[in-house]
Amino acid sequence: MKPRVSVALVFLLLAGMIAGLAQSGKKKGEETIRNVEGTLTDAAGAPVANGIVQLKDMKSLQVRSFITLEGGKFHFSGLSTNIDYEIKGQYNGVETDTKTLSVFDSRKEAVLNLKLKK
């Protein structure tokens, strides 16, 4: 091989490696993690503080709970994109419908608002 051809070949290989590293700038596992947040409201639409929101992992059946903050806000973080989750809320014996966060939902920051039944 001629020296010019080998230098060009090495340059192309290095450029390809640098481009590959630049594209994989995400931290390991970052692409498989997501969060969900929302607001718990009463039947009239007013936010409910101190309500309970439960998140159920449909693979392990583990349930995590969150007591809503002022303004009815709740959040769950560090959820796998490879698992379906069910989420529901309750306050003073009144519940919401159950919503599903599916593996087919590609949002990394999902918003699921919950409304208590009458």
Image: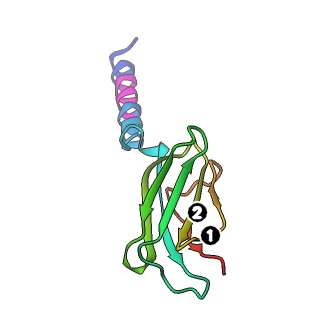
Q: Residue placed at 42% from the left, 70% from the top?
A: 68
Quadrant for the C terminus in the image: bottom right
Say which quarter of the image contains residue 65: bottom left
Residue 96: mark: 1
**Helix, strand or loop under label 2:** strand
The crowding category of the residue bearing disc 1, from other C-alpha atoms within 10 Å (few below 14, some 14 to 19, many at least 20), is many
The kind of residue tagged 2 is: Lys
Residue 30: mark: none
Task: Name the residue carrying label 2.
Answer: 88
Q: Nearer the viewer, residue 118 or 23?
A: 118
Q: Is residue 53 left or right of residue 29?
A: right
Say which quarter of the image contains residue 45: bottom right
Q: Nearer the viewer, residue 68 or 111?
A: 68
Q: Position of residue 70 (x, y in %)?
A: 37, 78
The crowding category of the residue bearing disc 2, from other C-alpha atoms within 10 Å (few below 14, some 14 to 19, many at least 20), is many
Q: Position of residue 58 (x, y in %)?
A: 61, 44
**Helix, strand or loop under label 1:** loop
The kind of residue tagged 1 is: Thr
Q: Is residue 56 left or right of residue 97?
A: left
Q: Find the residue positioned furthest to the top.
A: 1
Marks 2 and 1, how far apart in space? Answer: 6 Å
Q: Is residue 9 magenta?
A: yes
Q: Find the residue positioned furthest to the front.
A: 93
Q: Residue placed at 55% from the left, 58% from the top?
A: 107
Q: Is residue 69 above or below residue 102?
A: below
Q: Is residue 104 magenta?
A: no
Q: Nearer the viewer, residue 91 or 29?
A: 91
N-terminal of the pair, mark 2 or mark 1, is 2
Contact between labelled residues 1 and 2, with CB atoms less than 8 Å apart? yes
Residue extent of the magenta highlight: 8-15
Q: Position of residue 109 (x, y in %)?
A: 48, 60
Q: Is residue 57 above or below residue 60?
A: below
